[in-house]
Image (cartoon, helix red, strand yellow):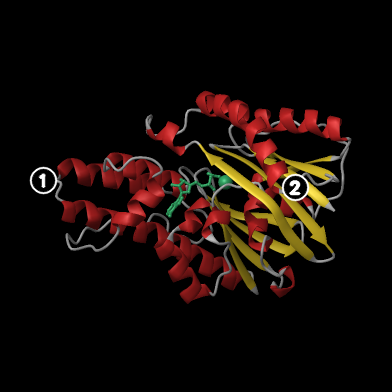
Amino acid sequence: MVILAIETSCDDTAVAILEKKGKQLKILSNIVSSQVKLHAKHGGIWPFLAKREHQKNLPVIFKRAMKMAKNPKIDAMAVTEGPGLEPCLWVGINFAKDLAKKLKTPLMPINHIEGHIMANFIENDSASIKFPVVCLIVSGGHTQLILMKDWLKYKKIGETRDDAAGECFDKTARILGLGYPGGPAISKMAKHNKAKITLPRPMINQDNYDFSFSGLKTAVLYNYKSQAKKSKTYIESMCFEIQQSIIDVLLKKTIKAARHYKAKTILLGGGVVANKELRKQFKLKLKAIMPKPSFCTDNAAMIGTAAFLHKKTKRKIEAKANLEL
Ligand code: KG4
Ligand code: ZN
């Protein structure tokens, strides 16, 4: 069975073609066209600019993906229906609907968060996970802890009450003048804390699985404003402390959830999981499983992988900006 998947929920236009033979999942093509350079000029994502780019790029990327996969017969299609930026989601959905009609294939609507979880199985053997599973999804739009008691059985046990962790990386990088996207920029400079900066770890000791990152952003802003000379040592120390503060909170809450729910497997996903230091600390302290960095950030292979788990549907597919898992 061959699935063609489309992802346009944020600022990446992505198409992937996957083939499943028995238990073997093979990527025939996987193309991601990032709009980072365009949005970097504005310091963040502009939804209508992103929509225009998706409209321009999606047909081109689709053709490239088909060519790379050697024009296989498509048995089914999958598209992200949410959560995400509504104008962007519609571009993928409308394109997918037209194409599914032309190719006479079923079209499966996929939740983007489920895609981030399933990114763990693009190249890994899914048999090696044991339930219950606790998943931590950390991206530019979401920070959620999810309990899985079985395949397709998701229960959200915690989430951010304000900014997502990726958003915090992006906003604090902007304060420090490091550009967009902030996660990779901060991680590159997070070498030491010679300036001995201390930032808060919001909600770290609270008895719940929720997060909050806007206070951390405000603390960075006040600290930065109070600093007369923003030396290289100061910026590097700030990056180190921002990154460690985010990791500390994510790690402590995930450990707490894993203990409480007696998790046998910990899965990570989402763009922030591309962070080297976070990967190191989660592997060491929790033996967490995580996708390779290029499958952490948005891609369509994860949407296709999730689609293999679902039955075909004839229900109406619409963009759902706030879709829950
Ligand atoms: O999952 P994703 O590609 O898109 C959303 O669904 O939001 O995540 C994008 C987010 C951005 O906030 C970006 O700054 C962050 O992931 N990110 C990182 C790293 N690479 C991307 N954060 C920390 N360290 C990184 N290396
Ligand atoms: Zn994402």
Callout 1: helix, strand or loop?
loop
Q: Residue at x 81, y 50 (%)?
A: 2
Q: Nearest the camera: 229 or 189?
A: 189
Q: Image height check: is 17 above or below 92?
A: below
Question: Image point 89% across, 35% down: which residue?
Answer: 104
Write down the residue under mark 2. 70
Q: Position of residue 298 (x, y in %)?
A: 57, 47
Q: Nearer the viewer, residue 10 or 22?
A: 22
The image quarter in which residue 21 lies: bottom right
Vertical arrangement, residue 64 with respect to residue 24, above or below: above
Say which label, 1 or 2, has the lower sequence index: 2
Q: Secondary structure at mark 2?
A: loop
Q: Residues within 10 Å of mark 2 (few under 14, many from 20)?
A: few
Q: Which mark is residue 248?
A: none
Q: Please report the residue visible at 53 percent of the width from the left and 23 percent of the height from the top.
A: 48
**Is the shortest distance between ligand 1 and the CB of mark 2 under 8 Å?**
no
What amino acid is found at the position of numbered circle 2 in the picture?
Answer: Lys
Q: Residues within 10 Å of mark 1 (few under 14, many from 20)?
A: few
User: Can residue 271 be seen at all in this image of the molecule?
Assistant: yes
Q: CA distance from mark 1 to mark 2?
A: 57 Å
Q: Amino acid at mark 1?
A: Lys
Say whether residue 89 is visible.
no
Q: Position of residue 198 (x, y in %)?
A: 25, 58
Assess whether mark 2 and mark 1 are in contact (beta carbons under 8 angstroms). Answer: no
Question: Is residue 79 placed above or below 245 in the rendered structure?
Answer: above
Q: Residue at x 22, y 51 (%)?
A: 235
Position of residue 52 relative to residue 195, above or below, is above
Which is in the foreground here, disc 1 or disc 2?
2
Q: What label sits on residue 229 in the rendered view?
A: 1
